Structure formats: structure tokens, C-alpha cells
Amino acid sequence: MNQSQQTIVEPSNPLSECPVPISTRSKVKVFLWKASGMFCVGLAILGAILPILPTTVFLIMATGCFAKSSPRMQRKLLNNKTFGPLIHEWQQHRSIPRKAKRVALLTIVLSVVWSGYLLQSIMLTLLVFLLVLGPFIFLWRLPVSK
């Protein structure tokens, strides 16, 4: 195992309490944040299995959701031996693994090509292209983790 997989993440903010002030938290909000976090973890697990879905993006979203609802769940996710290093790499260096970047970019390109084939309308294909252009450029410019 390399060192990044063995490292336990110690965030800069203590996780003993939620960063959202108690006065602004309601049980409904906390439940919705937890449910959203669990949904994102589920999508991340699917993304680890299926090449169509990204994994890292959903893990980052789940970490953010858990930061607002459950420090215990956030710690659990950050210290996970499979997913923790991906999240840690993003938090520390704003980078993603080369394989994840390639899969994400390839998926975007194939989606646009497939949409163009199915839509058979130049205007709708152009609209799809314009909608994915921003995320494509964002991913393209992200640094690759070492």
C-alpha cells in the first residue's frame, strides 16, 4: 500500500460538532443533508463499478453533506480506505486520479456524440454540446493526482 492509502485524514476543523450552528439546524435539514450524503455515497459506489458514473465528484458532495449533518459519517467517509484517499487528494490538492479524469472526459464526449446521433437535430445537438462544455473544460483543467 502506498502512504496516501495508509494515512488517516485529520481535517483542519474539529469534527466533534457540526460546522453549522445549532441554532440554524433543524431535524428536517439534518435529515435531508444526511439523506443527500447517503444518496451521493450510493452513486459513488455505483461509479466505482460502472464506468459511466464518476466516483470522486459524488464522494466530495457526500463529504460536504455530512459536514453539515453528521461529523461521525464525515469522519467515517474520510477514513475509509477506498474512498478516503480520493477525497483527501481533492481537499488537499484539488486534483483527481488520472483514470477518473479520463473516464469522465471520455464519457462526456461519448454522451455528446450519442445524443447527436439520437437527436438528429443540429440545434439540439448544439444545445447538448453547450451544456457540457463548462463541465468538460473544468475537468480538463483539473490537475492529476500523483
Image: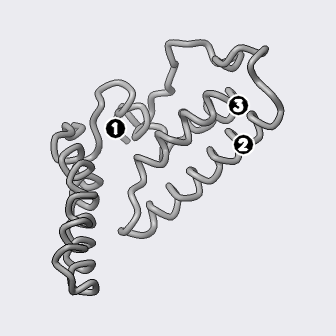
Q: Secondary structure at mark 1?
A: loop
Identified at 39% across, 57% down, the residue is 54
What residue is drawn where x is 21% and y is 79%? 116
Type of amino acid at the residue the image marks with label 1: Asn
Q: Are marks 2 and 3 in contact (CB under 8 Å)?
A: no
The Cα atoms of the two marked residues, 2 and 3, are separated by 11 Å
Residue 94 rendering spot, x and y as whole percentages: 30, 31
119 relative position to 63: left or right: left
Which mark is nearer the camera, 1 or 3?
3
Q: Which residue is mark 2?
A: 32
**Placement of 100 over or under 8, stated as above or below:** below
Kindly report the distance in space between the C-alpha atoms of the residues bearing marks 2 and 1. 36 Å
Q: Earlier in the sequence, mark 2 or mark 1?
A: 1
Residue 73 percent location from the top left of the image: 67, 35
Q: Is residue 21 left or right of residue 85?
A: right
> Between residues 146 and 29, which one lies in front from this camera angle?
29
Residue 23, horizontal then vertical, whole percent: 78, 14
Question: Residue 133 vs residue 66: left or right?
Answer: left
Q: Secondary structure at mark 2?
A: helix
Q: How far is mark 1 from mark 3, CA to CA?
A: 29 Å
Identity of the amino acid at label 2? Answer: Leu
CB under 8 Å between discs 1 and 3 = no
- The tag on residue 70 is 3
Crowd around label 2: few <14 · some 14–19 · many ≥20 (10 Å): some
Q: Which quadrant would residue 119 be assigned to in this image?
A: bottom left
> Looking at the rendered structure, which numbered label has been put on residue 2?
1
Question: Which residue appears at 41% of the width and 47% of the height?
Answer: 57
